[in-house]
Image (spheres, helix red, strand yellow):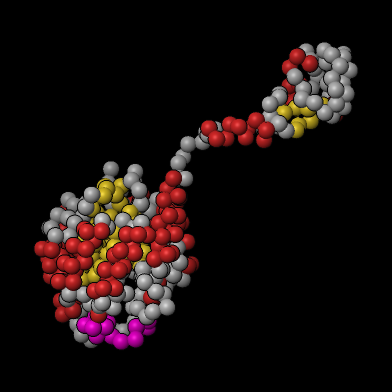
């Protein structure tokens, strides 16, 4: 059975869903804001809060195309707002202090090396690096669990990375993802989660969500996602790079609470539960008389029908009763008893 262990938390198909609050760069480089996000994520019940480690000249050329949702080029934005390695160290220690898992996405091999030296428990790899096989191979050499998003990727591209990770002999997960900010709902194709569980049995399958609400996360859990990653922001009215795809921490609380309730409800046993037994007695139907029946009469369909409660002869036995002979006079609108006929 595939399994991950991040810190003290096991992630498998038999464990609770692992919920990641993705802080991304919504802290805008403010360490106090980042720490507040850690605390709010803890209070909301998330398992983990995740940040990003950017070493700009290691991860990109200065002149790269600008996405339509960005006001300034990514390089310039990150130069202004990315956290330093010292910031990450402070945040990791703060997360330990308050009792929430710290994770971080490295956007280059050097960033991964620095995080490894910092003592991270696992690596979260973004969709943009999913096909970067040379970097994936090198990060895998740290022998720490990896969670890799699959936005913008085809199944054949995911399969290529899957084979590399299987050969690397590390525990890993894929998160289903659509790299639109925010996505069209018709582009989500959540049933891909089920396909990924079939195609990649050595991987834990999760879902990284970029919608501005929490509903598709609930659906992902019912489809078997064991990791949910959701972007968060302190105030949705304040500008941030992922503001349009982020939820606030009140919504995160409802997300966590909802997922925990859904998990409890996903059993596959059909039985009469203890709390249903009392209701069965009055809610089910029994056979009752629709008119007075005289001793010696042959019971016909017109003489009986079904009504509550279910404490008499079950209504599904009606065909067995029709044609029987009444042994005594029977009143109208009463439960029929077995000793009323032969």
Q: Is residue 19 left or right of residue 275?
A: left
Q: Tell me if residue 127 can be seen.
A: no
Stretch in magenta: 68-80
**Residue 25 colored magenta?**
no
Q: Residue at x 81, y 19 (%)?
A: 323
Q: Residue at x 35, y 59 (%)?
A: 43
**In the picture, which quadrant includes the N terminus?**
top left
Q: Position of residue 75 (x, y in %)?
A: 23, 83
**Residue 70 colored magenta?**
yes
Q: Depth check: 270 or 95 in front? A: 95
Query: Residue 227: which quarter of the image?
Result: bottom left
Q: Tell me if residue 264 can be seen.
A: yes
**In the picture, which quadrant includes the C terminus?**
top right
Q: Is residue 179 above or below residue 45?
A: below
Q: Residue at x 23, y 49 (%)?
A: 8
Q: Is residue 230 above or below residue 325?
A: below
Q: Position of residue 284 (x, y in %)?
A: 67, 33
Q: Is residue 275 left or right of residue 198?
A: right
Q: Residue at x 33, y 46 (%)?
A: 15
Q: Is residue 342 above or below residue 300?
A: above
């Amino acid at each position: 059975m595939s399994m991950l262990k991040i810190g003290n938390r096991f992630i498998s198909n038999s464990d609770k869903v692992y919920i990641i609050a993705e802080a991304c760069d919504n802290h805008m480089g403010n360490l106090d804001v980042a720490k507040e996000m850690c605390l709010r994520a803890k209070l909301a019940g998330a398992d983990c809060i995740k940040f990003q480690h950017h070493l700009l000249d290691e991860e990109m050329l200065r002149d790269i195309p600008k996405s339509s949702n960005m006001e300034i080029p990514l390089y310039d934005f990150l130069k202004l707002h990315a956290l330093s390695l010292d910031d990450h160290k402070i945040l990791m220690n703060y997360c330990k202090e308050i009792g929430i898992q710290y994770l971080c996405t490295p956007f280059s091999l050097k960033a991964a090396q620095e995080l490894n030296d910092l003592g991270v428990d696992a690596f979260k790899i973004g969709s943009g690096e999913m096909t970067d096989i040379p970097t994936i191979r090198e990060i895998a050499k740290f022998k720490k669990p990896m969670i890799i998003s699959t936005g913008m990727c085809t199944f054949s591209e995911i399969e290529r990375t899957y084979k590399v990770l299987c050969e690397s002999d590390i525990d890993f997960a894929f998160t289903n993802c659509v790299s639109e900010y925010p996505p069209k709902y018709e582009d989500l194709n959540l049933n891909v989660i089920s396909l990924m569980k079939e195609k990649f049995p050595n991987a834990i399958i999760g879902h990284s969500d970029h919608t501005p609400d929490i509903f598709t996360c609930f659906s992902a859990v019912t489809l078997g996602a064991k990791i949910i990653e959701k972007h968060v922001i302190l105030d949705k009215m304040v500008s941030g790079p992922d503001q349009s795809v982020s939820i606030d921490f009140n919504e995160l609380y409802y997300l966590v609470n909802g997922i925990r309730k859904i998990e409890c409800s996903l059993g596959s046993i059909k039985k009469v539960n203890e709390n249903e037994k009392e209701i069965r007695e009055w809610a089910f139907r029994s056979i009752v008389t629709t008119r007075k029946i005289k001793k010696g009469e042959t019971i016909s369909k017109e003489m009986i029908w079904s009504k509550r409660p279910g404490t008499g002869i079950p209504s599904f036995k009606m065909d067995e009763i029709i044609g029987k002979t009444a042994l005594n006079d029977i009143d109208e609108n009463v439960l029929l008893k077995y000793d009323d006929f032969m």
